[in-house]
Amino acid sequence: MNGNPEPGSVPALIRAGVAGLHPSEQRVAQVFIDRPEWTIEASAQEVADAADTSRATVVRTAQHLGFSGYPQLRVLLARDVGLSTRAVNETEPKDAAGVVRAVVRDVARAADDLALLLNGDDVLRGVELLLAAQSVLVIGNGLSAPVAMEAAMRLNAIGRSADAPMDHVAQGVRARLLGPQDLCIVVSGTGSTRPTVQAARAARDAGAGLIAFTAFTGSPLTEIATVSFVSGLGASSFRDEITRTTRLSQTIMVNALIRALIQADPESARLAQARMLDVIGEVFLQDPP
């Protein structure tokens, strides 16, 4: 990590980095996540005892999360806990309205995490890759498939040739047919889904650029991507990512990047949108006389 992260971003950085840690380090990171205020006051040995591991593991965990060591993590966590308005140790709501409010808060937190983790150079690189691409292959499986479909649809709507095959065999075949002039966009919550990562590797081997949308840093997908956008899904573990979360923050990021693409080439987008509206206008039935 070069310098200090942006104010408010430390909890997001910890949540995003959990999946790339070893099991003993994940236990340490979970202590940071579950007990941030206690962590600020605790020694490395106390954290180690809480996570049933060694003091050295606590230090390595902080370093693997991108900090110089546990002291820097504590100081920056103290800074960001003071900035946070989110209640610590919230209890699970019992009524339906409470559950809905909790989900909305989780989505809002995920969107905040996304903004905090966003890197301006990565955004610029992503837009450049999209501008230069002759064709775009969008890959997403499982819960990520709808995000991939929407990305392809919105790219086509602004004149960028894109497709999002749903079958993972078709994804692999299409990935191998890409070339250096093409781009592959991959959406994966965990960044570890086997068919998704295999297709992504095939695209990179073919010379195509690769934009990854995922929830965790240090995943197999981010390791091979040309540029990655870590969109927190409000989950601190793979289990929560699979069973409890939505893909709304990734959808937001996809739409935001496409909006930036439109701004970079407004005339092409305008002409394509005009053609799209012509097509849409032809599909509506006339009112009966």
Image (cartoon, grey):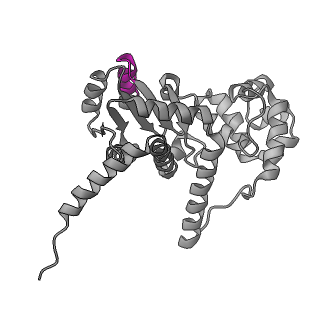
The residue furthest bottom is: 289
Quadrant placement of the N terminus: top right
Task: State the residue in front, 54 or 201.
Answer: 201
Residue that appears at 37% across and 43% down:
268
Q: Position of residue 51 (x, y in %)?
A: 73, 35
Task: State the residue in front, 140 or 21.
Answer: 140
Q: Is residue 211 above or below residue 108?
A: above
Q: Is residue 264 above or below residue 277?
A: above
- Please say whether residue 202 is one of the residues in the magenta stretch: yes
- Magenta region: which residues? 197-208
Q: Is residue 101 left or right of residue 186?
A: right
Do we see residue 151 in this rendering?
no
Task: State the residue in front, 268 or 43.
Answer: 268
Q: Is residue 238 left or right of residue 185?
A: right
Q: Give residue 142's quadrant in the image.
A: top left
Residue that appears at 69% across and 25% down:
64
Q: Position of residue 240 (x, y in %)?
A: 54, 46
